[in-house]
Image (tube, helix red, strand yellow):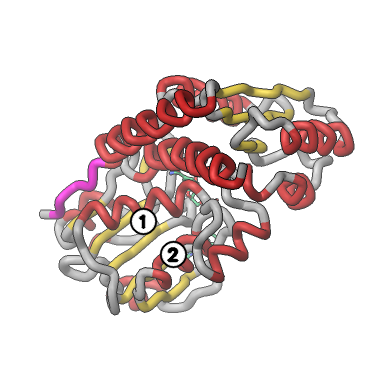
Amino acid sequence: MAEIIDGKAIAKRVRAEVRERALGLAERQGRAPGLHVVLVGEDPASQVYVRNKERAAGKAGIEGKVHRLPEDTAEPALLALIEELNQDVTVDGILVQLPLPGSLDSARVVRAIDPAKDVDGLHPVNAGELMLDGSGLTPCTPTGCMKLIQETGCSLEGRRALVLGRSQLVGKPVAMMLLRQNATVTMAHSRTQDLDARVREADVVIAAVGRPKLVRGEWIKNGAVVIDVGINREPDGTLVGDVDFEAASERASHITPVPGGVGPMTIAMLLDNTVKAAEGRERTR
Ligand code: NAD
């Protein structure tokens, strides 16, 4: 039976450590690190996410502020706000909640953020740093996945890692992070053939697709580490991952549950990135 990777407990530890660093910064600078979240429109899920981020920031000794803009905000107005936040010395982290309303070009908006304040790690400069030496701010969910793997104590060195999904947000960056840890990385996506065969040979599986129980338990190699990023709602309202958790638990050595696995890590790593950004800016002053 697999050991369950307790994302909630690990995230709690990360948040406590972040809080210590945030309090240290506040003492040295006379102000808490500042995380500014920009929310455009009324999307109910985004509203919940943003509220959670603001609350979590406060608990971690970070000053969280939400800028709420109407659905019909024109791009120049949004870009002007971002520029204002870029220039504001009390702002350490800027996050634009995605997805943006269809009339706005999210790639252009993300590019407008100062890379040193880009706590979502999505700016092309930070994406590029990840390809080069990993020195920039890295996207929160993939960073959380790596922390969970690290917590298992399992080495990635020379092991076969399979990433399902190739999104900018999760799949691509996590593949690069695995490569940096010397794993032999395969990426699977919607056009991949023989997905079951790819899963069967993987020592580490990271599933970030968004299809309930796409990965069957019998595909999992004995002793594999399974990180399930997927969040899917079943018709009866329950949340399930991309992996059939019950069956996969019979074979995996370590596995994340959904909920309570990767999910809590995403906000924890956002807070970590905010403090990292603040520490980085402190060093360059
Ligand atoms: P996305 O829709 O941008 O990307 C999905 C990827 O899955 C695509 O690259 C696609 O090629 C691939 N794919 C589709 N069908 C496939 C198949 N049959 N086999 C293999 N790959 C296939 O999604 P995303 O933003 O990367 O998110 C993926 C999932 O992770 C979603 O369920 C999302 O809700 C969840 N998510 C969770 C967190 C968290 O904090 N836990 C954060 C981000 C995303």
Residue at image location 57% in from the left, 59% down from the top: 167
Counting from the top left corner in percent of width and height, residue 148 is at 30, 51
**Where residue 158 sits: x, y (%)?**
29, 79
Name the residue carrying label 2: 177
Q: Amino acid at mark 1?
A: Met
Q: Is mark 1 within 8 Å of ligand 1?
A: no
Identity of the residue drawn at 55% across and 69% down: 131
Q: What amino acid is labelled 2 in the image?
A: Met
Magenta segment includes 212: no
Above-or-below relation of 270 to 41? below
Q: Nearer the viewer, residue 185 or 42?
A: 185
Q: Is residue 62 left or right of residue 195?
A: right
Q: Secondary structure at mark 1?
A: helix
Picture quadrant of residue 103: top right
Compared with 112, 25 (above or below) is above
The answer to which of 59 and 20 lies nearer the viewer is 20
Q: Estimate the spatial distance between the alpha carbons at disc 2 and disc 1, rounded to whole Å.
A: 8 Å
> Where does residue 109 sit, x and y in percent of width and height?
76, 45
Of residues 28 and 75, the one nearer the viewer is: 28
Q: Which residues are magenta?
A: 2-6
Secondary element under disc 2, as helix, strand or loop, is helix
Q: Position of residue 166 (x, y in %)?
A: 54, 64
Residue 236 visible here: no
Query: What residue is at 47 percent from the left and 78 percent from the top?
Result: 193
Q: To which residue does mark 1 refer?
A: 146
**Upstream in the sequence, badge 2 or badge 1?**
1
Q: Residues within 10 Å of mark 1 (few under 14, many from 20)?
A: some
